Each structure stands twice: as C-alpha cells, then as structure tokens.
Image (cartoon, rainbow, N blue to C red):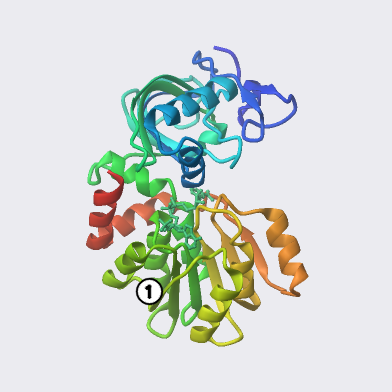
Amino acid sequence: MNKGCKYGTHRVVEPKGTLPQPALKIDNNMEIYDNELLIDVITLNIDSASYTQIKGVCNAEAMKMKEMILSIVKERGKMQNPVTGSGGMLIGTIKEIGQNFPDKSLKVGDKIATLVSLSLTPLRIDQIIHLDPSSDQVDIDGQAILFESGLYAVLPTDIPEKLSLAALDVAGAPAQVERLVKKGDKVCIIGGGGKSGVLCCYEAMKQAGPEGKVIVVEYSKENAQRIIDMNLATEVIVADATNVMDIYHKVTAIVGEDGCDVVINNVNVPSTEMSSILITKDEGLVYFFSMATSFTKAALGAEGVGKDITLIMGNGYAKGHANLTLNILRESKPIRELFERLYV
Ligand SMILES: NC(=O)c1ccc[n+]([C@@H]2O[C@H](COP(=O)([O-])OP(=O)(O)OC[C@H]3O[C@@H](n4cnc5c(N)ncnc54)[C@H](OP(=O)(O)O)[C@@H]3O)[C@@H](O)[C@H]2O)c1
C-alpha cells in the first residue's frame, strides 16, 4: 500500500498544494493508501443547503437530481455542490482498513457514519438506488474513503441507522449550543423548525433554563407549530428571515431593544446574516451554522451597523458532538418520533 498524508493531500488532483475540501478535484480511485478506510456506502445525507439548491435547479425532478449528483461526483471525485460548496455525510460498512489507520478497534464489517464533510470525501457512485426529492437521504451503490484525520462514529445499536445519519449530519449545531448558551440567556434560533434547529432548540431550552428565553424564527407555519406543540421554545415567530427589519421588530418586541445574548442561524437559504446580527445585543454572539452564510455579508454587515459582536462560523465538529446529539434522540421521545417521521 502507498503511504498517504494524514490530511488526504495525496488525493488532491487540482489545484496542487491545497487540501481535499477546497480542492476542485480529488482522486476517487478506491485502491486505499496505508492510512485510509474504504467504505461500502449505504446512504448519503446531502447537506440541506446543497440539496435545496439542487432541487431548485432541477425543479424537484428526481431523474434530473440524480443526474446532477452523478455529474458532480464524476467531475470532482466528491459530492461537493459547486454553488454552496457544501457536502453532507454518509453511512456505510467498512470494507478495508489500511495497516496504518490509527484506530485499531475498528473491524471490517463495522457500520459507521462519517463525521467529516462529503465535500472532502473521495466518493465513487456506481448507481443511485433511491432518491426522493423531499428527503436529503440518497441511497447509493458506491464506495468512499476516509482519511486518517477523518472523524467517524460507529453506529449505535439502539437507534435505527438512517435516524442516526439524519441527526449526526447536524451534530455540530446542538453541541455548540451547549457551549454557548448560559443560564438565563435570551436566545434566538433562526430556522429553528428544521432538522438542526429542533436539536438546537432542545439544547438551548436546557441550557437557558426557566429564567431564559428561547425564541424561534421559522418560515413555515407548519414547522413553527411543531415547535409550539413540542414545547421547544418560549416564543415562536413565523416570518421570513431574509426580511431584516421585520425580524428585528418582531424579536426586539419580545427581548427589548438590547437584543439577544446568543443567536443561532440554522436556515438553508442565503441572505439572513443581517437579521441575525441586528437582533444580537452588544458583545453578544451569533453562531452561523447555515452553509448559506456569506462571510463577506456577515463580517462587513456587522461592521456596517456598528455591532461589536462575536461571529462564529459553524465548525461542524465539536468534541463529543455525536454523543450529545444521539442522546437528544434518546432523551426526547417527541424529537425522536419527529425525526423518524420526517427523515427516515
Ligand atoms: N456547519 C456545518 O457543519 C453544517 C452541517 C450540516 C448542515 N449545515 C447547514 O445548516 C443549515 C440547516 O440544516 P438543516 O439540515 O437543519 O436544514 P433544514 O432541516 O432544511 O432546516 C432549515 C430551516 O430553515 C427554515 N427556513 C428556510 N428559509 C427560511 C427563511 N427565509 N426564514 C426563516 N426560516 C427559513 C426552513 O423552513 P421551511 O422548511 O419552512 O423552508 C427550515 O425549517 C443548512 O444551511 C445546512 O447546509 C451546516
């Protein structure tokens, strides 16, 4: 076996000198290097911002969406949406383990979820077995590679695998909420009715406690109603988060002119940066989990309105994120039932 770089640079085809995530093309030859894992893929969970973009361009036609996914992977050697830049993650069965892969406890045949983005994961798709435009989980025949530095979780036995996949896809979000939200905080979760939003609401309610406030801004009445029914927020606002001043007036009517201590952005559409920034109090913080976030709009926008606030980019990884997220499914029967209904 050839010796590979810890970070997968040996698979970068172009441009040379970069890492696999920002690379335009990576080598998806499935002959493994000494420090890699080969995975027989079962299901891809395409990132929501990416899937929404593909669905829009393809008018929600399954055939066209399949063709677009196949052509992206053929061109790039990975499932990285060229418009959003984002990927997703996958579940599969370990087929082969390089002799220098660091974790010696893994065995061929173990089922794992990769916890690094598909936007850097060498992937070959032989066939798309099932694609439903309304679900971002796509069943395929194909293989993928995990680098030595790649994170993964062995799938638990008490949670169905597709349910774990759905939750682990967004595990970084509730884990950051656990770190960022303090007792008594006023928190606003934008796009709180979606997959990551629901998990963040649960964690924010837990951390802010009875003295705190958790406000959800959600686009559809249906998603908003779910949050009310599950008691996952203290207030729910139905509004379009791209309509900045409307959001500002509605949120400050609840928390006061000073704004929120913490704002979590979980939408899957562009142009919600300023809504998040305007409702954040001086020296408060915004966590942009959304992949539709523009660094330029957020950084220059905050400066433009004179806001001294901390803007945190949504690093998908936080230590312990997989366990924390799977534990939410174990602790909350309503969330588990909702996820089973929507995502499995
Ligand atoms: N940072 C990371 O590592 C990472 C990892 C995974 C995912 N992500 C990103 O995180 C975001 C959320 O992912 P997800 O899986 O939770 O997505 P999701 O389930 O599709 O949730 C998105 C939510 O945002 C709502 N929304 C959309 N447009 C809105 C608007 N204009 N105003 C208010 N709410 C709006 C949606 O409402 P409707 O359903 O009514 O449209 C939905 O409830 C995506 O951008 C995804 O790409 C980031």
Q: Residue at x 74, y 24 (%)?
A: 16
SS category of the residue bearing label 1:
loop
Q: Can residue 122 be seen in the rendering of this structure?
A: no
Q: Disc 1 marks which amino acid?
A: Ala
Quarter of the picture holding the C terminus: top left
Q: Is residue 29 left or right of residue 274?
A: left
Seen in the picture, residue 42 relative to 259 is either above or below; the reply is: above
- Determine whether the beta carbon of the residue marked 1 sits less than 8 angstroms from the nearest atom of ligand 1: no
Residue 165 screen position, x and y as percent? 36, 42
The one nearer the camera, 164 or 237, is 237
What is the x, y in percent for residue 151? 49, 39
**Does residue 33 show up?**
yes
Q: Residue at x 44, y 28 (%)?
A: 64
With respect to residue 255, does 202 lie above or below? above
Label 1, residues with CA under 10 Å away: few <14, some 14-19, many ≥20: many
Screen quadrant of the N terminus: top right
The front one of 294 and 22 is 294
User: For mark 1, what is the residue?
Assistant: 233
Q: Where residue 93 appears, x then y in whole percent?
A: 34, 27
Residue 170, relative to residue 155: is it above or below? below
